[in-house]
């Protein structure tokens, strides 16, 4: 079963699915800066383009080009900045 999610007035869109018993989403982030909250731990893998990300409570922005990933603890938040459309896969750990 697939689910479509739209955030930030359409600037972030994702398709949710379950694979091997684990929930995941695949989506696109339009140029801009966005904050996401998390319930469960997540791994974000950039598959196209690039973005910058920082974890809630940190002042450090890190760059993530295609082929790289970062993890976010559950019950927290993270910020992303994209200067061009960016494709990602988010796995819920």
Image: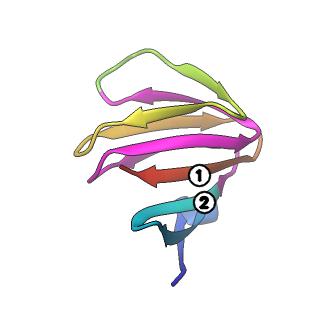
Is residue 92 placed above or below 78 in the rendered structure? below
| Highlighted range, magenta | 28-56
Residue farthest toward the front in the current orientation of the protein: 20
Q: Say few, some or many: other residues with alpha carbon within 10 Å of mark 1 (under 14 / 14 to 19 / 20 or more).
A: many
Location of residue 34 in the rendering, given as x and y in whole percent from the top left corner: 51, 44
Q: Are marks 1 and 2 in contact (CB under 8 Å)?
A: yes
Q: Number of marks in the image?
A: 2
Q: Which residue is mark 2?
A: 26
Report the disc number at residue 7. Answer: none
Q: Say few, some or many: other residues with alpha carbon within 10 Å of mark 2 (under 14 / 14 to 19 / 20 or more).
A: some
Report the disc number at residue 89. Answer: 1
Task: Give the residue drawn at x 33%, y 49%.
Answer: 37
45 inside magenta stretch: yes
Task: Give the residue drawn at x 45%, y 26%.
Answer: 54
Location of residue 74 in the rendering, given as x and y in whole percent from the top left corner: 26, 44
Is residue 92 placed above or below 73 in the rendered structure? below
């Amino acid at each position: 079963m697939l689910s479509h999610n739209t955030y930030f007035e359409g600037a972030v869109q994702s398709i949710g699915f379950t694979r091997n018993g684990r929930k995941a989403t695949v989506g696109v982030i339009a140029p801009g800066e966005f904050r996401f909250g998390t319930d469960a731990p997540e791994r974000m893998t950039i598959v196209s383009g690039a973005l910058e990300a920082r974890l809630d409570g940190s002042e450090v922005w890190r760059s993530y080009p295609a082929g790289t990933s970062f993890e976010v603890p559950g019950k927290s938040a993270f910020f992303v900045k994209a200067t061009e459309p960016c494709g990602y896969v988010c796995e819920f750990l």
